[in-house]
Image (cartoon, grey):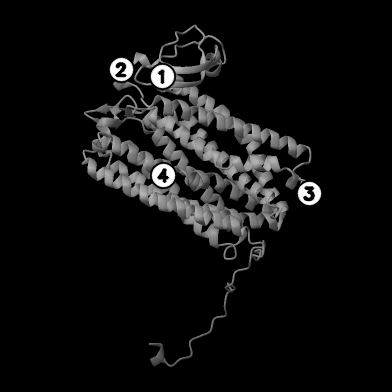
Amino acid sequence: MELLSNTVALSRMQFALTAIFHMLWPVLTTGMGIYLVIVEGVWLKTRNPDYYYHARFWAKFYVLNFGIGVATGIPMEFQFGTNWAPFSEAVGNFFGSVIGFEASWAFMLEAAFLGIMLFGWERVNPIIHFTSTILVAVGANLSTLWILTANSWMQTPAGGEMVDGKFIVHDYFQAILNPFMVNSVLHMFFATLETSLFVIGGISAWYILNNRQSAFFSKSLKIALAAAIAVAPLQIYIGHLSGEQVYHYQPSKLAAMEAQWHTTPAGQPADWSLIAFPNDKAEKNDWEITVPNALGYILEFKKNLSEPVRGLSEWKPEDRPHLVGLIYYAFRTMIAIGFFFAGLMLFSTLQWLRGKLSPENISQQKLLMLGWIFAAPLGYIAVESGWIVRCVGRQPWTLYGQIRTVDAASHLPASNVLVSLISFASVYTILFIAAMYFGSRIVRRGPNLELPIPSLEISKPAINTTPGEFVPDERPVEAEQ
């Protein structure tokens, strides 16, 4: 009952719900946009109709996710003005601008060319259509750029200072290029791309496992695999760089990620907690398994630490993250999925080199296809886990070190927030069921291989543009007037 009367807690729960649900949809559109550029480009290059049909088939998933992403993204951003008005008022001169960039630069660009990408196959020439597909993908990924820029600035505010309760920007470029920005954008970019690749690969594997157009879907699986060869190891490396930044800029978050309650001084080795049961109240782990001296190698690739790893007990309870168990296991879930993707990619590549993924043999790789099907939803779990670590671990700050979460929330009746929270949960449940229904229907129907293939030749203009012969006006003078 105490929770239901706490406006701040309810506002946090509402934002968590809307953010977690919204994140499910643009994760796929940002990565699949790049995939659509690839398959359409291969079709234009090779004129193999299979790639044209791939572009038409996977675009259905794109538009489904785009629609729900728009419907859920707008309410999420509106909460900055409803539930988090003091925060918006304090940082609006920078934060509001960046969120505006996302809407005007990214969303508008994506939406403007989406219609041409979906319905312009036989209405515009191939170059215009391909350009539209590229611009849709660029717009989708510009959203990642600006959203991660805004969130990174909340993690490591730069480019100005707080004056009388408001953040005054002195250098917009320094604020945009804050310490977390580059790695955060890259980490999310590769997360969306990796998730999309394994969703595409997983759906393709389902068709292959069920002997439905195996030769056709072996192409999409191989494209996903070829891209994953580069993406999966890069994502692990960039994730490591992001962890290093947390080590230097947000030591309390690192302590929560590792469930480390006591400080390890510089110059000493530190054990890495493999699994533990964190106890927030007792400020200890009730049980854990550790790997001796491993944390130094993880953070600095050496045994002894150059800087101390501070323990949570160094901060007052009101100045450090809580829900340590959630942060701890969300972090390990993300890492485990990242290494599973890399392992699946490596094994699939070996099978490809052995000729096991040829159209004649791929249907026999049942265990491998099951692995890809199992991997399809894991990218979503990894992304959501990463955002939990990122945002819950930032607490008790909304703007790290500057504005506390309790001071950022609007002064609303708790009952009002509870009603809106329940309303969001109800509507989003309906949206999720609808998305699963329409997505499964797309899968059941499969690609339409009877669609007419557009001509790749640039059609001549329909209007005759040759100069016409001058014909003098022979009407009577009265008619001419």
Q: Earlier in the sequence, mark 4 or mark 2?
A: 4
Q: Is residue 55 left or right of residue 73?
A: right
Q: Is residue 93 left or right of residue 133?
A: left
Marks 1/2: CA–CA distance: 14 Å
Q: Earlier in the sequence, mark 4 or mark 1?
A: 4
Query: Which element type, helix, strand or loop, lies under badge 4?
Result: helix
Query: Which element type, helix, strand or loop, lies under badge 2?
Result: loop
Task: Please name the residue shown 67% across and 45% down the image.
Answer: 221
Judge whether residue 340 can be spotted in this image. yes
**Residue density around tag 1, few if under 14, some if 14–19, many if 20 or more, within 10 Å:** some
The x and y percentages for residue 430 are 41, 53
Marks 4/1: CA–CA distance: 30 Å
Residue 251 badge = 1
Marks 4/2: CA–CA distance: 37 Å
Q: Quadrant of residue 48?
A: bottom right
In the image, what residue type sits under mark 4? Glu
Look at mark 4 in the image and give the residue it sits on. 102
The answer to whether marks 4 and 1 mark residues whose Cβ atoms lie closer than 8 Å is no
Look at mark 3 in the image and give the residue it sits on. 360
Q: Quadrant of residue 387?
A: top left
* Outermost residue toward the top in this view: 267
Judge whether residue 108 can be spotted in this image. no
Look at mark 2 in the image and give the residue it sits on. 316
Front label number (4 vs 1) = 1
Residue 377 badge = none
Vertical position of residue 441 compared to residue 330: above or below: below
